[in-house]
Amino acid sequence: MKKLNFNIKFNLKIGIFTFTSLFFLYLLYLSIPSLFDTGRVQKALYKNLNNDFGLNLSLSSDITYRILPQPHFHIKDSKIYHTKSDVSNEIGEAKDLKIFVSQKNFFNKNNIKINKIIFSKVNLFLKRENISFIKNFIKNEFSEKKIFIKNSKLFFNDRDENTVFIYSIKNLDLFKNKKENIQKISTNGELFKVPIKFQWLKNLENNNTMSNFKARKIDISFTNKGNFINGKYEYENNLNISTNNFRTIYKINKDHIDFSSKKSLIKNTPISFKGKIDTSPFSFEVQINAKDIDINY
């Protein structure tokens, strides 16, 4: 059998020219969205944000397109709305919003696909009647595309618009992990100037949930498990306050909460309790059994 010899001569100048040309064409391709009509982009982004993430945003016309670090639209001064009974109420404002888009087909200006979004400098104003906004949001299935919130504040106000508390958000991310089939919210920030970490998980196969909370300076942490049984949740809460540990099982009913504990500790003293909290009108009844309790402590 004869041997075949291939002699390939590489011309450095041609190689550099080819690479430079391809890179230049790639940059031109990435620059295509900068030629899109602002109004058309604004409309397409609003539609996809609503469909993909369930967000009702009013996007300003102050939209700029940037290639680095990844192709994205930068939007200033957006408004966040909560729609209830076909009435939209403004609940927040985002000074900076970055919408990162897919590079697959920039030639189709009517099909802008979002990869992830990053909110920065958000002020979110919530009241008791807006709690349904959060409940509905976490009840629905998240998008696999991530939502990030950075350097923002959540204000919780009473009916008279007095601020009850402010949560300073350092980082928050929210997404669906398709591989593990879970939904996840993870955040760290400050509440009453106390650094806290919080994580919420939901298993999409059985609807079970788990929450983890930790406050560093005041030595408080808890784990809360929600077990979805026969269409209702039964909860297990493990609360640690310094050397005290409270393990509570509870059920939230329409107008009351039933709770009990058999393995709790107060200053190393075993304690058990059970009771009921009526929510409307508010009242509660608790039965406590313990060998010895220091009431002053």
Image: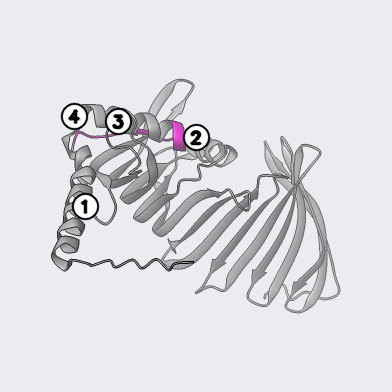
Q: CA distance from mark 4 to mark 3?
A: 12 Å
> Looking at the picture, how far across and down is residue 90, in whole percent?
35, 33
Residue at 13% across / 65% down in the picture?
Answer: 13
The answer to which of marks 4 and 3 sits earlier in the sequence is 4
Total labels: the figure holds 4
Residue 37, label in figure: 4
Residue at 40% across / 50% down in the picture?
Answer: 154
Q: Is residue 3 left or right of residue 101?
A: right
Amino acid at circle 4: Asp
Is disc 2 placed on a helix, strand or loop? Answer: helix
> Looking at the picture, how far across and down is residue 18, in whole percent?
19, 56
The answer to which of marks 3 and 1 sits earlier in the sequence is 1
**Residue 287 visible, this orientation:** no
The residue mark sitting in front, 2 or 4, is 4
Please tell me in which quadrant of the rendered image residue 295 appears: bottom right
Q: CA distance from mark 2 to mark 1?
A: 55 Å
State the residue position of label 2.
129
Residue 77, label in figure: none
Is disc 1 placed on a helix, strand or loop? Answer: helix
Q: CA distance from mark 3 to mark 1?
A: 21 Å
Give the vertical position of 210 relative to 280 (above or below): below
Is disc 3 placed on a helix, strand or loop? Answer: loop
Q: CA distance from mark 2 to mark 4?
A: 38 Å
The answer to which of marks 2 and 4 sits earlier in the sequence is 4
Disc 3 packing (10 Å; few <14; some 14–19; many ≥20): few
